Amino acid sequence: MHAETGTELRAPGDFTHIDGDPLYIQYNGLWTSAKVFTEGNDSNPAYKAECRLRAPNVRVTKTSNAEVIGFSTLHPVSIHCNMTLHGRKGKLQALSNWKTKYTHLSYAYSDSAAPMPMEWTSQSSFKTWDFVCVDDKQNPVAKFVSNNWRTHKMGRIEFLGPKAHDEKAREEIVVCGLTMYNVMMLRMNNFLSLGGAFFNKTGPFTPAQIEAARREGGVEPEEVEVLEDKYGNGKQH
């Protein structure tokens, strides 16, 4: 089973890159869940994602041990969203009020104690909707591709660079990519997000925010379990 690959992801002038095995994404008919799998393994997905109206809106679980690797909460007005990845709280923050440009702080791609600011941009066409992730030097590390014409919104995640086989880096991209997709779907179909685009403050993380994240990152992340109350609302425990 193949997904629309979109344009190839390659770093200009880079002949030593390492491509990891791409991951495929397939939603169910109700768009309430998705499975993420390597080619030919759609019956045995590596991850499962839940996409819900109530928070946490996106939750990704590793199927081998039922570990919740990350979850995110979208907001009806704010164009930013909150994420928790491997027990570390973070944010997917808009860089622009109107353009599809977001940033998040990455521990997986950083080679130091300080998290690295990553940037997501969009390359869209009539048929496909692509989100490209680059590092702080603007080197592409991943691309999330969705085919808007497939019944179950088949997607694909491509990986590039020296961390293309790194499990933590790949899982970060899975959580952030699915969050990006759902954020933009919400913004396109929710008129309240229009007000958020007008009034929300956008821009990169400040040095103070990165330093605060560095200090917090030095602490072993907490084990996170997402519970639900009797109304189906997510709680972090």
Image (spheres, helix red, strand yellow):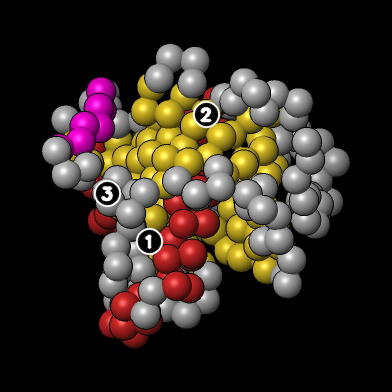
Camera-near label (1 vs 2) is 2
Q: How many marks?
A: 3
**Residue extending farthest front:** 29
Residue holding disc 1: 93
* Amino acid type at image mark 2: Tyr
Give the secondary structure at mark 3: loop
Q: Residues within 10 Å of mark 2 (few under 14, many from 20)?
A: many
Q: Earlier in the sequence, mark 3 or mark 1?
A: 3
Seen at 59% across and 34% down, the residue is 36
* Amino acid type at image mark 3: Ala
Q: Are marks 1 and 2 in contact (CB under 8 Å)?
A: no
Q: Is residue 220 above or below residue 32?
A: above
Residue 137 placement, left or right of 10: left
How far apart marks 3 and 1 lie (CA) works out to 18 Å
How far apart marks 2 and 3 lie (CA) works out to 19 Å
Residue holding disc 2: 47
Q: Which residues are magenta?
A: 223-229
Q: Is residue 118 above or below residue 94?
A: above
Q: Are marks 2 and 3 in contact (CB under 8 Å)?
A: no
Seen at 47% across and 80% down, the residue is 98
Residue holding disc 3: 55
Give the secondary structure at mark 2: strand
For residue 193, the mark is none
Residue 107 placement, left or right of 234: right
